[in-house]
Image: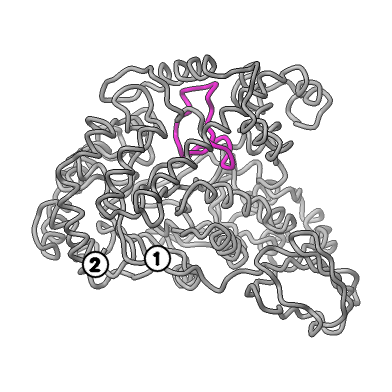
Amino acid sequence: MTDLRLELAYARGIYAEYYDQMGVHHATSVETAVALLAAMGIEAATEEAARLHLEEGDGVLPWDVVCEAGKAPFVDIGEARWELILEDGEETRGQGVSDLPELPLGIHSLIAELPGGPQRITLLAAPATIPLPERGWGMTVPLYALSEKGIGSYDDLLPLVQSLGAKGAGFVGMNPVHAGFPTDPGLFSPYTPSHRRRLNALYLATDTGRGGKLIDYVKAGPTRLKHLRKSFDRTTPSPAFLAYVASEGPALETFALHQALSEVHGPFWCHWPTEYQDPESEACVAARSELKEEILFWSWLQWKAEVALSELQDEAKASGMAHGIYLDLAVGTHPHGAETWEDREVFAFGASLGAPPDAFSAEGQNWGLAPFNPITLRDRAYAPLAETFARQLRVSGMLRIDHILGFERTFWVPQDAPGSYVAMPRDAMLAVARIEAARAGGIIVGEDLGNIPDGLREALSASGVLGCRVAMFERWNWDDPEFKPSEAYDEAAVASFSTHDLPTWLGWRQGADITARCKAGGIDGAQAVENMAHRTREVAAIDRVLPGADQDALHDFLARTPSRLVAVQAEVILDMIDQQNLPGTTSEYPNWRIRLPGGAGALASHEKLERVAEIMRRNDR
């Protein structure tokens, strides 16, 4: 007989079992089930507690109904009376499903008087699909690495945007620009943000910083913040800034209060005095008055960052770019940063996002990021997710969703037990993406790499969400390497050779990633020799499908694919060998610290760019 705690876990979307990338079967234990339920806010340490939860149903969540904007929805309510509350607050009443009106684009609420009692229903009125972009190309760059001194800035992108726009490129992509931890400059990974709905102020340009091959965030961060403080005029704030503060309302004040308190108590709210751990506490209410000037400063930084990105997007479009800025959305947020402090209920606590065991990580991965709680997300009608998308798309034309496999299922790792998958409301989340893309006129890209659930890529394609087709992964065979020809690539995709987590073109061909892993202790010498031998076979195999062995041949191959967009990588243009990030490492490798030689200016004027542009033009891009 199945343990009731396991039954409850399965009923709440926790997988009973899964297979990892190596085909190994894993069954979810009672220990894991109890820990993941607790992370969802469901305490079920005993079977009796689990039985009560199963009998009581843990409250009634709204139904999710995905429908097409501009049409009347079908909702299985028979002849029940209902009240419809549109997203803008307009209310309508009626009876029976046939009375339901055509719905405008947005997320609406329906309350139906059913025999069992009132039922909340979330109506996600979305376009059927996001139109695919025309054939085009662009470049991806690490924003932090664009300056020859200090930390790269939004301003460093300007010459690159102008140069690429003049050459026919449609976008410039970069790492996430979410708000980080400016009071602790050692926390600089762009994929471990403090708040995904706020911007990174340390990318605002100042005239100071040191050079060198590697970025020294510990010195550059405080120096930049110091100079930004000098630039802030506390006495006569501009009307535009005051208008921004008024339009952002209490949410901006809450974020700015978090930043001000971080200066006093440290970056993580879990270490703050108890009275400050709740933003609505009496102590925090008092702090809003006591720290008024500091709150204004941190609010000003957000305004400056948004203005900088908005102006950059305007310049990109003016230069001829079809899409302009291409931002990246991190898969999760730091469990004790500004985002979870402001909106705690929507996140799961006591479990971290991660990945099951694979060829690189025999024990699996723990990313140290807080996942959305699917129960609360559904209860809140996906508002936090919608706002997260909207915030990014109001300063960009394209948005990449990191690890979009998390729309189907997310891998949660509890503190003291093995991890397991948790089901996510995929169709509703994709509808939210389509709604926000339609509002902004933007493009959505999903990083669909790794252990891909059945049916996910088909669902993404049907929604018009572009996938990522990475040439080093596009193969018919891995053991005896055989790469796909260009014509076999998917149309609804962005094609590239690599990503920030993978080796560069030259690095891959030389086995630099294998050497780095061996040096970092991830593999031993014997494994490195074996991997190098296999890499030699891989390089020979890819050269058989390329028209040559140089960069031009690579770019010609990518340009000839059916994929609607091609992403050329700055590291390829600059003949870089070292990759920006080596997954599974921390201090063993200089992740997110490697500068581009010559900075943005050298890249913008590089002679290879015109050759790339000509290759793209020849292939109708």
Q: Earlier in the sequence, mark 1 or mark 2?
A: 1
Is 195 inside the magenta-drawn segment?
Answer: yes
Give the SS element for disc 2.
Answer: loop
Seen at 71% across and 72% down, the residue is 103
Horizontal and vertical percent for residue 544?
Answer: 11, 64
Left or right, 29 with respect to 532, comes to: right
| Disc number placed over residue 498 in the picture, else none | none
Horizontal and vertical percent for residue 337?
Answer: 61, 33
Seen at 45% across and 70% down, the residue is 461
Left or right, 301 with respect to 563, comes to: right
Quadrant in the picture for the N terminus: bottom right
**Type of amino acid at the residue the image marks with label 2:** Asp
Quadrant in the picture for the C terminus: bottom left
Left or right, 520 with respect to 387, comes to: left
**Type of amino acid at the residue the image marks with label 1:** Pro
Seen at 20% across and 44% down, the residue is 573
**482 or 82, nearer to the observer:** 82
Horizontal and vertical percent for residue 482?
Answer: 19, 66
The residue wearing badge 2 is 620
The residue wearing badge 1 is 133
**154 or 433, nearer to the observer:** 154
Range of residues picked out in magenta: 177-199
Rendering quarter of residue 135 = bottom left
Rendering quarter of residue 189 = top left
